[in-house]
Image (cartoon, rainbow, N blue to C red):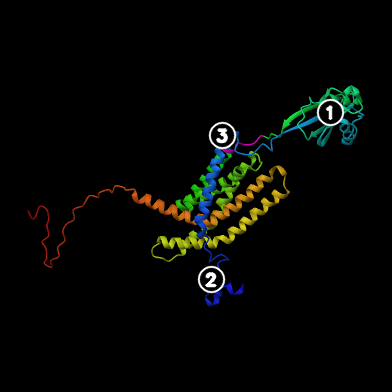
Amino acid sequence: EDKNVPNLLKEEKQTYFGPYQDRDFTKRAKPVAIGVGAFSLIAIITMSIFGAINGSIYNVNPVYEETSRAYITVYSDSPVVDSVTYIEDNILKFIYVDGELVSYSSIDHETREDYDAETTITTTYNYYIVNFDKAYSGEEDAYFEGDPLSEGMSLEGVLDAYIDSVEGGEGLVRIKVSENLVMQPSTLHIALGALAGVALAAFYLAFRYRISRALAAFSVSAIASFATLGFFVVTRIATTPIVALVVPVVALFSLFASLYFLIRERDLLKEDRSKEKTAQVRKEIMIKATALGAGPLFVFGIIASYFAINYFGFGPANFAVLFGGMLLGVALSVLLIVTLLGPSALFFEELIGKIVARIRVPRLRKSKKRVAPKSTSSEPEETIFIGIND
């Protein structure tokens, strides 16, 4: 609004510093600290229990459940089995397993051609993968409807016999039970790497914004990333260890977002004209710095959330949990920064001050030099020349 813009010709001073200039976010510091602390304690206990019992802190059973697939290979130049529709309408529709029609969810099809330069023969390979709904081992009792010879055969045997008969020996069927296992990086290694990176960044912040501010930023960053990971452990949401990648992302975001407070506080301390920076003065500056930095911080958080929401809703399904965790971590980081970062900085400043006050450094005694006495009399003094006045 125009009324908030100062008139420099009239030497007006700036009075509007943002929509949150009069808000004290740190009033909620105590309940937020208690809530986050209690949740972190629950997360630690939960991680210890499930890690010892299941060997993994995550709920991976729904993700890693066994699946069964039939791999059908046809290597013929003029195959009879030439499409997914043929397998559905002419094969699977007539196969019964343990008295029930075979159950499947989908069929994948890939084609490859091999050319032999010596014989000038091109061989076409058709690969079909039947994804069953049930975990068939291939040894179940099965039969092909209308074929008495297939009775008493296994599921794999029925499929193999049919493909072999219609393709003239140019077909092969194998049924395998597999798990959806994907090699994932170690959660411990990711956590340690993120911790080392945050510690290194905090070391730089210690030189730039004082040790107490660096410790506060490090603490908020570590708590935000750990609590985000702990959310998936406590709630037992089905996921894989890939969700551990939210730890470095949330830690990095939290450190960057902390700069909005640190920069504001440093500038306000320079502008303050108080003769002595008492604890009350520093507290008032901390509250004001948090209020002034809240606006840009919220905008930064919304932008980061926008990317997380996009990939969570429209990205690969396997990474939806990862981006959902990022969204949760961004929201938690913003909450902790506006409520706990300032009070934490003052707490560490007071703690460091007490530690320094208890450290007694021995003082070096300076040798006293003999100083010739000065006469205050107005009488003229006799000049002494060595060897003459003796």
Q: Nearer the viewer, mark 2 or mark 3?
A: 3
- In this picture, residue 220 sits left or right of residue 326: left
Which mark is drawn over residue 15? 2
Give how far across and how far down residue 48 sits, in percent: 55, 38
Give how far across and how far down residue 102 sits, in percent: 83, 32
- In this picture, residue 123 sits left or right of residue 201: right
Q: Is residue 248 visible?
A: no
The residue range painted magenta reads 183-188
- Decide which of 133, 211 is in the foreground and name it: 133
Amino acid type at mark 2: Thr
Which mark is drawn over residue 151? none
- Decide which of 223, 64 is in the foreground and name it: 64
Amino acid type at mark 3: Ala
- Quickly name the residue at label 3: 52
**Residue drawn 74% across and 29% down?**
177
- Quickly name the residue at label 1: 73
| Residue at the far left in the pictured view | 390
- Which sits earlier in the primary sequence, circle 2 or circle 3? 2
- Is disc 2 placed on a helix, strand or loop? loop
Quarter of the image where one finds residue 322:
top right
How crowded is the residue under tag 3: few (<14 C-alpha within 10 Å), some, or many (20+)?
A: few
